[in-house]
Image: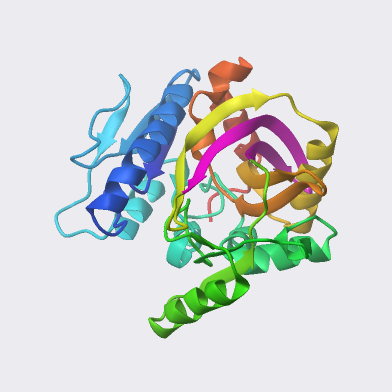
Amino acid sequence: MKRVVVFEYVTAGGDVGGPAERDELMPMGRAMRDALVADLLAVPGVQVSAAVCPQADELPARARALRPRKGERTVDFMAREAASHDLACVVAPETGGLLLHYSRQVSPGRWMGCRPQAIAVAGSKRATLQRLDEAGVCTPLRMAEARRWVVKPDDGAGALDTRVHRSHEAALHDQLARARTGQVATLEPWVEGEALSLSLLCRGGGEAEVLSVNCQDVAVDDAGRVHFHGVRVNALPGAESLGRIATAVAQALPGLKGFVGIDLVWHHQHGPVVIEINPRITCAYAGLSAALDRNLAAELLTLYAREPAHA
Protein backbone atom coordinates (compact mmCIF):
# COMPACT_ATOMS: atom_id res chain seq x y z
CA MET A 1 0.00 0.00 0.00
CA LYS A 2 1.45 3.36 -1.06
CA ARG A 3 0.66 6.22 1.31
CA VAL A 4 0.26 9.67 -0.25
CA VAL A 5 -0.38 12.93 1.59
CA VAL A 6 -1.98 15.93 -0.12
CA PHE A 7 -1.12 19.27 1.45
CA GLU A 8 -2.85 22.26 -0.10
CA TYR A 9 -1.66 25.36 1.72
CA VAL A 10 -4.90 27.34 2.03
CA THR A 11 -7.13 24.42 3.04
CA ALA A 12 -4.44 23.28 5.48
CA GLY A 13 -4.88 26.53 7.41
CA GLY A 14 -1.95 28.46 5.95
CA ASP A 15 -1.79 32.21 6.45
CA VAL A 16 -2.92 34.09 3.33
CA GLY A 17 -3.47 37.54 4.82
CA GLY A 18 -6.88 38.93 5.71
CA PRO A 19 -10.40 37.49 5.38
CA ALA A 20 -10.81 38.87 1.85
CA GLU A 21 -7.76 37.01 0.57
CA ARG A 22 -8.87 33.82 2.31
CA ASP A 23 -12.37 34.09 0.85
CA GLU A 24 -10.90 34.50 -2.62
CA LEU A 25 -8.40 31.66 -2.40
CA MET A 26 -10.30 29.06 -0.35
CA PRO A 27 -12.66 27.83 -3.13
CA MET A 28 -9.76 27.40 -5.54
CA GLY A 29 -7.65 25.62 -2.94
CA ARG A 30 -10.47 23.28 -2.03
CA ALA A 31 -11.20 22.46 -5.68
CA MET A 32 -7.55 21.56 -6.32
CA ARG A 33 -7.23 19.51 -3.15
CA ASP A 34 -10.43 17.53 -3.61
CA ALA A 35 -9.80 16.82 -7.29
CA LEU A 36 -6.32 15.53 -6.54
CA VAL A 37 -7.54 13.45 -3.60
CA ALA A 38 -10.35 11.91 -5.68
CA ASP A 39 -7.96 11.00 -8.49
CA LEU A 40 -5.50 9.40 -6.07
CA LEU A 41 -8.26 7.40 -4.38
CA ALA A 42 -9.13 5.91 -7.77
CA VAL A 43 -5.67 4.36 -8.05
CA PRO A 44 -5.54 0.78 -6.69
CA GLY A 45 -3.22 0.27 -3.76
CA VAL A 46 -3.03 3.95 -2.76
CA GLN A 47 -3.98 5.28 0.68
CA VAL A 48 -4.68 9.02 0.71
CA SER A 49 -4.45 11.55 3.52
CA ALA A 50 -5.06 15.30 3.22
CA ALA A 51 -4.54 18.31 5.45
CA VAL A 52 -7.70 20.17 6.46
CA CYS A 53 -8.72 23.31 8.32
CA PRO A 54 -12.06 24.17 9.97
CA GLN A 55 -13.23 26.03 6.84
CA ALA A 56 -12.49 23.04 4.59
CA ASP A 57 -12.65 19.89 6.68
CA GLU A 58 -14.76 17.69 4.39
CA LEU A 59 -12.87 15.34 2.09
CA PRO A 60 -13.89 12.80 -0.56
CA ALA A 61 -14.94 9.50 1.00
CA ARG A 62 -12.12 7.18 2.15
CA ALA A 63 -9.56 9.98 2.49
CA ARG A 64 -8.06 10.51 5.94
CA ALA A 65 -8.16 14.04 7.35
CA LEU A 66 -5.01 15.44 8.95
CA ARG A 67 -4.94 18.36 11.37
CA PRO A 68 -2.02 20.26 12.90
CA ARG A 69 -1.07 19.84 16.53
CA LYS A 70 -1.86 22.67 18.89
CA GLY A 71 0.49 25.57 18.19
CA GLU A 72 2.21 23.75 15.32
CA ARG A 73 3.46 25.89 12.45
CA THR A 74 2.05 25.08 9.03
CA VAL A 75 5.48 24.22 7.60
CA ASP A 76 6.21 21.88 10.52
CA PHE A 77 2.80 20.25 10.07
CA MET A 78 3.58 19.65 6.40
CA ALA A 79 7.10 18.33 7.01
CA ARG A 80 5.93 15.97 9.76
CA GLU A 81 3.21 14.43 7.65
CA ALA A 82 5.43 14.22 4.56
CA ALA A 83 7.99 12.26 6.54
CA SER A 84 5.34 9.72 7.59
CA HIS A 85 4.07 9.09 4.04
CA ASP A 86 5.67 7.60 0.95
CA LEU A 87 4.90 10.61 -1.24
CA ALA A 88 3.86 14.20 -0.57
CA CYS A 89 1.96 16.33 -3.07
CA VAL A 90 2.21 19.93 -1.86
CA VAL A 91 0.33 22.84 -3.41
CA ALA A 92 1.51 26.17 -2.03
CA PRO A 93 1.97 29.70 -3.40
CA GLU A 94 5.38 30.96 -4.42
CA THR A 95 4.77 34.12 -2.35
CA GLY A 96 7.57 34.85 0.06
CA GLY A 97 9.50 31.83 -1.17
CA LEU A 98 6.92 29.58 0.49
CA LEU A 99 6.79 26.77 -2.09
CA LEU A 100 10.58 26.82 -2.37
CA HIS A 101 10.94 26.56 1.41
CA TYR A 102 8.44 23.68 1.53
CA SER A 103 10.26 21.82 -1.24
CA ARG A 104 13.42 21.87 0.84
CA GLN A 105 11.68 20.39 3.89
CA VAL A 106 10.76 17.14 2.11
CA SER A 107 13.23 14.46 1.01
CA PRO A 108 13.64 14.29 -2.79
CA GLY A 109 12.26 10.77 -2.90
CA ARG A 110 8.99 11.88 -1.34
CA TRP A 111 8.48 15.23 -3.10
CA MET A 112 5.89 15.11 -5.92
CA GLY A 113 6.76 18.38 -7.57
CA CYS A 114 9.29 20.51 -9.38
CA ARG A 115 12.89 20.71 -8.29
CA PRO A 116 13.89 23.58 -5.98
CA GLN A 117 16.07 25.20 -8.65
CA ALA A 118 13.10 25.49 -11.02
CA ILE A 119 10.81 26.74 -8.24
CA ALA A 120 13.37 29.40 -7.32
CA VAL A 121 13.32 30.89 -10.84
CA ALA A 122 9.56 30.53 -11.38
CA GLY A 123 8.94 32.08 -7.97
CA SER A 124 10.21 35.42 -9.29
CA LYS A 125 8.24 36.92 -12.16
CA ARG A 126 11.20 39.10 -13.11
CA ALA A 127 13.70 36.22 -13.11
CA THR A 128 11.27 34.04 -15.07
CA LEU A 129 10.82 36.59 -17.86
CA GLN A 130 14.56 37.20 -18.07
CA ARG A 131 15.29 33.47 -18.31
CA LEU A 132 12.62 32.91 -20.95
CA ASP A 133 13.68 35.97 -22.94
CA GLU A 134 17.25 34.68 -23.03
CA ALA A 135 15.90 31.37 -24.33
CA GLY A 136 14.05 33.12 -27.16
CA VAL A 137 10.56 32.74 -25.72
CA CYS A 138 8.26 35.72 -26.36
CA THR A 139 7.45 37.54 -23.10
CA PRO A 140 6.13 41.01 -22.16
CA LEU A 141 9.73 42.23 -22.29
CA ARG A 142 9.36 42.31 -26.09
CA MET A 143 6.20 44.46 -26.08
CA ALA A 144 7.76 47.76 -27.20
CA GLU A 145 4.38 49.07 -28.41
CA ALA A 146 2.58 48.67 -25.04
CA ARG A 147 -0.27 51.08 -24.26
CA ARG A 148 -0.67 50.00 -20.64
CA TRP A 149 1.65 48.72 -17.91
CA VAL A 150 1.07 46.37 -14.98
CA VAL A 151 2.61 46.36 -11.50
CA LYS A 152 2.39 43.22 -9.37
CA PRO A 153 4.26 41.45 -6.58
CA ASP A 154 7.36 39.78 -7.97
CA ASP A 155 6.47 36.59 -6.12
CA GLY A 156 2.69 37.01 -6.01
CA ALA A 157 -0.03 34.43 -6.48
CA GLY A 158 -2.99 34.87 -8.80
CA ALA A 159 -4.11 38.44 -9.39
CA LEU A 160 -3.65 39.64 -5.81
CA ASP A 161 -2.24 43.19 -5.56
CA THR A 162 -2.01 43.45 -9.35
CA ARG A 163 -2.82 46.80 -10.95
CA VAL A 164 -2.86 48.05 -14.55
CA HIS A 165 -1.87 51.66 -15.38
CA ARG A 166 -2.46 53.72 -18.50
CA SER A 167 0.95 55.38 -18.37
CA HIS A 168 4.44 54.18 -17.62
CA GLU A 169 4.89 57.10 -15.24
CA ALA A 170 1.90 56.03 -13.12
CA ALA A 171 3.13 52.44 -13.09
CA LEU A 172 6.59 53.53 -11.98
CA HIS A 173 5.05 55.63 -9.20
CA ASP A 174 3.10 52.56 -8.02
CA GLN A 175 6.22 50.40 -8.05
CA LEU A 176 8.25 52.96 -6.08
CA ALA A 177 5.44 53.40 -3.56
CA ARG A 178 5.44 49.66 -2.94
CA ALA A 179 9.23 49.64 -2.61
CA ARG A 180 9.01 52.26 0.15
CA THR A 181 6.87 49.83 2.18
CA GLY A 182 9.30 46.96 1.62
CA GLN A 183 7.37 45.25 -1.19
CA VAL A 184 9.24 43.86 -4.18
CA ALA A 185 7.10 44.53 -7.25
CA THR A 186 7.72 44.04 -10.94
CA LEU A 187 6.69 46.48 -13.66
CA GLU A 188 6.12 45.17 -17.16
CA PRO A 189 4.06 45.95 -20.27
CA TRP A 190 0.45 44.82 -20.09
CA VAL A 191 -0.15 42.41 -22.96
CA GLU A 192 -3.44 42.97 -24.75
CA GLY A 193 -5.21 39.84 -25.94
CA GLU A 194 -6.92 36.65 -24.83
CA ALA A 195 -5.80 35.34 -21.42
CA LEU A 196 -4.98 31.63 -21.60
CA SER A 197 -3.15 29.05 -19.58
CA LEU A 198 -1.48 25.78 -20.46
CA SER A 199 -1.60 22.74 -18.22
CA LEU A 200 1.54 20.68 -18.74
CA LEU A 201 2.85 17.31 -17.72
CA CYS A 202 6.61 17.76 -17.49
CA ARG A 203 8.64 14.57 -17.39
CA GLY A 204 12.06 16.12 -16.82
CA GLY A 205 14.88 16.62 -19.25
CA GLY A 206 13.01 19.38 -21.07
CA GLU A 207 10.12 17.12 -22.09
CA ALA A 208 6.64 18.65 -21.72
CA GLU A 209 3.20 17.50 -22.86
CA VAL A 210 0.41 20.05 -23.24
CA LEU A 211 -2.53 18.50 -21.40
CA SER A 212 -4.97 21.32 -22.05
CA VAL A 213 -5.34 24.89 -23.25
CA ASN A 214 -7.53 26.79 -20.79
CA CYS A 215 -9.34 30.13 -21.00
CA GLN A 216 -8.84 32.44 -18.03
CA ASP A 217 -11.53 34.87 -16.91
CA VAL A 218 -9.45 37.97 -16.09
CA ALA A 219 -10.97 41.42 -15.68
CA VAL A 220 -9.59 44.89 -14.99
CA ASP A 221 -11.88 47.26 -13.08
CA ASP A 222 -12.10 51.05 -13.44
CA ALA A 223 -9.38 51.53 -10.81
CA GLY A 224 -7.00 49.25 -12.70
CA ARG A 225 -7.25 46.36 -10.25
CA VAL A 226 -6.97 42.94 -11.86
CA HIS A 227 -9.44 40.23 -10.83
CA PHE A 228 -9.26 36.52 -11.57
CA HIS A 229 -12.72 34.96 -11.79
CA GLY A 230 -11.81 31.41 -12.73
CA VAL A 231 -10.74 29.20 -15.60
CA ARG A 232 -12.51 27.16 -18.27
CA VAL A 233 -10.50 23.97 -18.45
CA ASN A 234 -9.65 22.37 -21.79
CA ALA A 235 -11.59 25.11 -23.58
CA LEU A 236 -9.47 25.28 -26.74
CA PRO A 237 -7.80 22.64 -28.89
CA GLY A 238 -4.04 22.54 -28.53
CA ALA A 239 -2.11 24.37 -31.22
CA GLU A 240 1.27 23.28 -32.55
CA SER A 241 2.80 26.64 -31.59
CA LEU A 242 1.70 26.14 -27.98
CA GLY A 243 3.39 22.74 -27.89
CA ARG A 244 6.60 24.41 -29.01
CA ILE A 245 6.20 27.05 -26.30
CA ALA A 246 5.75 24.33 -23.65
CA THR A 247 8.91 22.54 -24.74
CA ALA A 248 10.89 25.79 -24.86
CA VAL A 249 9.77 26.68 -21.33
CA ALA A 250 10.64 23.21 -19.99
CA GLN A 251 14.09 23.42 -21.57
CA ALA A 252 14.67 26.94 -20.26
CA LEU A 253 13.90 25.92 -16.67
CA PRO A 254 15.56 22.57 -15.89
CA GLY A 255 13.83 20.94 -12.95
CA LEU A 256 10.23 21.50 -14.03
CA LYS A 257 8.58 18.17 -13.33
CA GLY A 258 5.04 16.95 -12.86
CA PHE A 259 2.02 19.20 -13.26
CA VAL A 260 3.02 22.73 -14.32
CA GLY A 261 0.96 25.72 -15.42
CA ILE A 262 1.91 28.46 -17.88
CA ASP A 263 -0.03 31.73 -17.99
CA LEU A 264 0.07 33.42 -21.37
CA VAL A 265 -1.77 35.93 -23.52
CA TRP A 266 -2.52 35.45 -27.21
CA HIS A 267 -1.47 38.73 -28.81
CA HIS A 268 -2.84 39.61 -32.25
CA GLN A 269 0.65 40.37 -33.58
CA HIS A 270 3.12 38.40 -31.46
CA GLY A 271 1.03 35.27 -30.91
CA PRO A 272 1.51 33.48 -27.56
CA VAL A 273 3.26 35.69 -24.99
CA VAL A 274 4.29 33.90 -21.78
CA ILE A 275 3.46 35.85 -18.61
CA GLU A 276 4.51 33.50 -15.83
CA ILE A 277 5.10 29.88 -14.85
CA ASN A 278 3.39 28.08 -11.97
CA PRO A 279 5.72 25.24 -10.87
CA ARG A 280 2.93 23.29 -9.15
CA ILE A 281 -0.63 22.05 -9.51
CA THR A 282 -2.94 24.91 -10.46
CA CYS A 283 -6.68 25.46 -10.29
CA ALA A 284 -6.93 24.12 -13.86
CA TYR A 285 -6.30 20.64 -12.43
CA ALA A 286 -9.85 20.44 -11.07
CA GLY A 287 -11.95 18.55 -13.60
CA LEU A 288 -9.08 17.97 -16.00
CA SER A 289 -8.80 14.20 -15.49
CA ALA A 290 -12.47 13.81 -16.36
CA ALA A 291 -12.18 16.13 -19.35
CA LEU A 292 -9.25 14.16 -20.74
CA ASP A 293 -10.56 10.75 -19.64
CA ARG A 294 -7.23 9.95 -18.01
CA ASN A 295 -6.27 9.88 -14.34
CA LEU A 296 -3.52 12.48 -14.10
CA ALA A 297 -2.73 11.62 -10.49
CA ALA A 298 -2.02 8.04 -11.53
CA GLU A 299 0.41 9.32 -14.16
CA LEU A 300 2.10 11.53 -11.59
CA LEU A 301 2.54 8.54 -9.28
CA THR A 302 4.18 6.61 -12.10
CA LEU A 303 6.43 9.57 -12.88
CA TYR A 304 7.64 9.98 -9.31
CA ALA A 305 7.98 6.25 -8.70
CA ARG A 306 11.27 6.54 -10.60
CA GLU A 307 12.68 9.02 -8.07
CA PRO A 308 15.76 8.08 -5.99
CA ALA A 309 15.32 6.38 -2.63
CA HIS A 310 14.32 8.50 0.36
CA ALA A 311 17.09 10.78 1.58
* Closest to the observer, 52 or 271: 271
Image coordinates for residue 301, horizontal then vertical, percent: 57, 32
Q: Residue 282 location in percent, x, y?
A: 52, 41
Q: Is residue 263 magenta-colored? A: no
Which x, y percent locates residue 144? 78, 65
Q: In which image quadrant can residue 178 be found?
A: bottom left
Q: Nearer the viewer, residue 224 or 23?
A: 224
Residue at left offset 74%, top offset 34%: 209
How was the colour assigned to the protein in this rendering?
rainbow
| Magenta-drawn stretch contains 211 | yes
Q: Is residue 215 left or right of residue 250?
A: left
In the displayed structure image, the side of residue 170 where residue 91 appears, left or right: left
Q: Nearer the viewer, residue 209 or 146?
A: 146
User: Can the viewer see residue 282?
Assistant: yes
Is 213 on the left or on the right of 100, as rendered? right
Query: In the figure, is residue 267 to the left or right of 308?
Result: right
Occupied quadrant, residue 134: bottom right
Q: Please give the range of residues in magenta.
A: 195-220
Q: Give the quadrant of the N terminus.
A: top left
